[in-house]
Image (tube, helix red, strand yellow):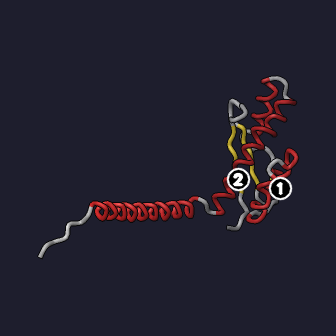
Amino acid sequence: MAYAKKSKKSILSEKGIKRTIVTVIILAILMVILAVLAYIFYTPERIVKSKIENIATDYYENFFYQDIVKYKTTESQLTATMQKYEQKGFARVALQQLLLYDNQKHADAASILKGYCDETQTYITIYPEYPYGQKDYHIDYNYSCEF
C-alpha cells in the first residue's frame, strides 16, 4: 500500500488552523483576565470614593485655597490663618457643597454620587500643613454611602 503524500497546501492550512486556534485561546484568556481586573477595580465604591477625592482636591487647590490667598495679602497673614486650622481643620464641607461650588463645576458626577451617598452626611475636613502651600494639606473623608 502506498501512502499519500500531503500536499504543501494542506500542511500550510493545518499550520494556519493551529495558529488561529492558539490565537483565539490567548485572546479568550486575556479577555477573562481583563474582566476579572475590571470587576475588582471598578466597583461602585471605588468609583464613588475616587470621584469624591478628585472633587475635594480640586475644591481645595483651585477654589478654597485661592480664595484664602486672595484675602491674605502677606505671607505672615497666610501663615497665621493656616496655623489656626492646622490641628482642628477647616469647617466640614458636605458633598452637597462640593457639588455646588464654582457654578456646579462637577455636576456631571452628581447623579452617580447622589445615587450612592447621603449629600449632607458625606463630608470632608481639610487640614492645612506647613509650609501652607497650595498642595500642603490632607483631607479626612467621612462617607455615608451604601454600595
Viewer-closest of 106 and 4: 4
Between marks 2 and 1 in the image, the one whose residue lies nearer the viewer: 2
* Other-residue count near label 1 (Cα within 10 Å), few / some / many at <14 / 14–19 / ≥20: some
User: Which mark, by number, is residue 96?
Assistant: 1
Q: What x and y, as percent, mark residue 78?
A: 79, 29
User: Which mark, by number, is residue 51?
Assistant: 2
User: Which mark, by number, is residue 117?
Assistant: none
- Mark 1, secondary structure of its residue: helix
Q: What x and y, as percent, mark residue 142?
A: 71, 56
Viewer-closest of 82 and 3: 3
Give the mark nearer the N terminus: 2 vs 1: 2
Q: Residue furthest left?
A: 1
Q: What x and y, as percent, mark residue 140?
A: 69, 50
Give the answer, above or below, for where 95 lies relative to 139: below
Viewer-closest of 29 and 41: 29
Q: Residue at x 75, y 61 (%)?
A: 112
Give the answer, above or below, for where 33 lies relative to 104: below
